[in-house]
């Protein structure tokens, strides 16, 4: 998941669209096609709009972490302390 902020500094909509497209393409290339890129473009009174933040929170809440095949094939234990009596 990626978040692109400070898009309110663009004065022209054409330049903003080009920049969004360029960053989205680069993000998909670097991270993978299954990742989601969010755009926060309106900064109002020191906060981003509640609707955009709610969309991100919903995405995080509904997403499931990918299962890693190596981890499922190789069981492991994390021990805080080991005592023998």
Image (tube, rainbow, N blue to C red):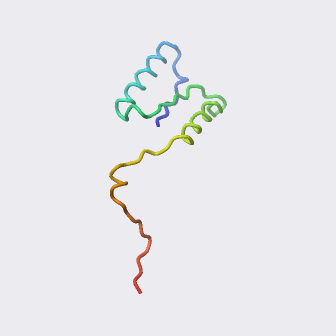
Residue 61 horizontal side relative to residue 20, left or right: right
Percent across and percent down for residue 73 are 33, 55
Residue 42 horizontal side relative to residue 72, left or right: right
Quadrant for residue 59, please give it: top right
Task: Name the residue at 59% across, 33% down.
Answer: 55
Percent across and percent down for residue 74 are 33, 58
Residue 47 horizontal side relative to residue 80, left or right: right
Q: Is residue 68 above or below residue 81?
A: above
Task: Name the residue at 62% across, 35% down.
Answer: 54
- Which residue ends up furthest to the front in the rendered image? 73
Number of numbered discs on residues: 0
Percent across and percent down for residue 51 are 64, 30
- Which residue ends up furthest to the bottom in the rendered image? 85
Task: Name the residue at 47% across, 32% down.
Answer: 36
Quadrant the C terminus occupies: bottom left
Task: Name the residue at 35% across, 33% down.
Answer: 30
Residue 54 horizontal side relative to residue 20, left or right: right
Asked whether 2 or 78 is in front, the reply is 78
Q: Is residue 36 above or below residue 18?
A: below
Asked whether 68 or 31 is in front, the reply is 68
């Amino acid at each position: 998941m990626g978040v692109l902020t400070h898009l309110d500094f663009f004065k022209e909509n054409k330049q903003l669209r080009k920049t969004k497209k360029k960053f989205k393409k680069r993000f998909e290339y670097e991270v993978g096609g299954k990742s989601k890129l969010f755009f926060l473009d309106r900064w109002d009174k020191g906060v981003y709009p509640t609707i955009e933040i709610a969309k991100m929170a919903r995405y995080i809440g509904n997403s499931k972490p990918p299962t890693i095949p190596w981890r499922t094939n190789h069981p492991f234990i994390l021990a805080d302390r080991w005592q023998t009596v």
